[in-house]
Amino acid sequence: MLLLKRSLARKSFPGKWNFVSGVIEDETPRECALREVREELGTGFKTKLVREGVPLTDTQPEGSWEVHPFLFAHISGEPRLDGEHTEFLWTEKEKVAGMDTVPNITEDLKRLGLLPASRRRRENI
């Protein structure tokens, strides 16, 4: 999977690894995801939308976000980073949890069906 390192100039989570992300404007979450991939990785980076994950709300001290995870398959091309990111890295999904990432990034992977969902233990009362 492709991770991007957020620029130190970013207001939220500077220097943290993340996926392509963005703010939904006057568009659907799907349209936003397609636009952000083009903007953040360049038009020469070709992808195919594979699936949409279950949305979630992520509340942190920095703010609250409605997250709509999408899974894209890489077809061809190399990322051409814009000013939002300073580095990119290809890695395996199992290694993401041990990296310096934005909060709850593994939850995105679970919502896309790429990692097993957490099982909550039932307590007998």
Image: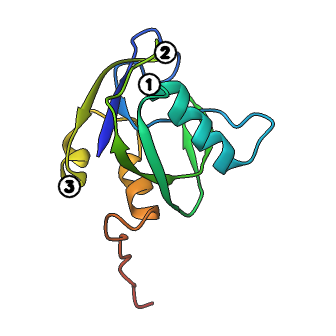
Instruction: Kindly indicate whether the residue at mark 2 contacts the one at mark 1 (C-beta within 8 angstroms).
Output: yes
Amino acid at circle 2: Arg
- The residue identified by callout 3 is 94
Please name the residue shown 77% across and 41% down the image.
27
Q: Which amino acid, by three-letter code, is at mark 1?
A: Phe
Q: For this view, does 104 lie left or right of residue 66?
A: left
Q: Amino acid at mark 3?
A: Glu
Of the pair 114 and 32, the residue shown nearer to us: 32
Provide the secondary structure element on which disc 3 rests: helix
Could you give the CA–CA distance between mark 3 and mark 1, rounded to whole angstroms? 22 Å
Residue 61 can be seen in this image? no
- The residue most toward the bottom is 124
Q: Position of residue 48 (x, y in %)?
A: 47, 52
Of pointers 3 and 1, the one earlier in the residue sequence: 1
Q: Which residue is mark 2?
A: 10
Where is mark 1, residue-wise?
13
